[in-house]
Each structure stands twice: as C-alpha cells, then as structure tokens.
Image (spheres, rainbow, N blue to C red):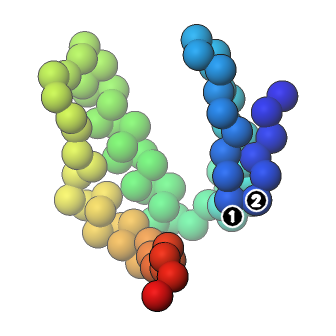
Amino acid sequence: ALVASGYCLPVIPAGGQAEIVFDAGFGDSWATVPADLAQAVMIIAAQFYETRGGVSGTVAFPAEVIRILAPYRNLRLIAGGRS
C-alpha cells in the first residue's frame, strides 16, 4: 500500500493503480448528512442517471447544486514561495 506522507502523495508506478480512501463528512450513515447536502447528492445522482447513455465533453453541476453547496465550500490560500 502507498501511504501519503504529510502533504506529498506517493508516486504511482507506470501502469499502476491507486485507491484513495479517506474519512470526511458528517458521520458514517446517510441519516447524519444535512438535508440540503442530501438533496444535492440526489440531484447529482438523478443527473447521472438521466445521462447514463453517455455524454460528450464535460458535465457541469446543475445551478441548484452549486447554490446548495456554496455555504459548505472552503477556500485555502497557501503561499508557495519565499520572498
């Protein structure tokens, strides 16, 4: 198993695969997810179901999902250089 160290991800060998596992969120069951986030998940799932035949190009989240998720969005600004 490849394990991340600090802020660096391990190098995946050519032709290799990666499985990413992390714990995040509001609990370990659907019942602990806030209702508005659960609604966003259902909207996205419905969109994927409706386009299950495939799409060309990229697919954007519906405007309603973006609106629901906006209060939960975190932004981080990290300085990467020295002055």
The image shows residue 19, relative to residue 9, as above or below, that is above
Q: Is residue 27 left or right of residue 43?
A: right
Q: Residues within 10 Å of mark 1 (few under 14, many from 20)?
A: few
Q: What label sits on residue 26 in the rendered view?
A: 1
* Residue 73 x %, y %: 44, 72
Q: Which of the 4 image quadrants contains residue 14?
A: top right
Q: Is residue 11 visible?
A: yes
At 26% across and 27% down in the image, what residue appears?
A: 50
* Residue 35 x %, y %: 52, 64
* Residue 32 x %, y %: 69, 61
Q: Circle 2 sits on which residue?
A: 6
Q: What label sits on residue 53 in the rendered view?
A: none
Judging from the image, what secondary structure is the residue with disc 1 in?
A: loop
Q: Quadrant of the N terminus?
A: top right
Judging from the image, what secondary structure is the residue with disc 2 in?
A: loop
Q: Mark 1 and mark 2 in contact? Answer it, CB < 8 Å.
A: no
Q: Is residue 36 left or right of residue 66?
A: right
Q: Is residue 79 left or right of residue 53?
A: right
Distance from the alpha carbon under mark 1 to that under mark 2: 24 Å
Q: Is residue 28 visible?
A: no
The image shows residue 64, relative to residue 83, as above or below, that is above
At 29% across and 62% down in the image, what residue appears?
A: 66
At 25% across and 14% down in the image, what residue appears?
A: 53
What amino acid is labelled 2 in the image? Gly
- Earlier-in-chain disc, 1 versus 2: 2
Please state which of residues 74 and 39 is positioned toward the viewer in this rendering.
Answer: 74
The image shows residue 50, relative to residue 29, as above or below, that is above
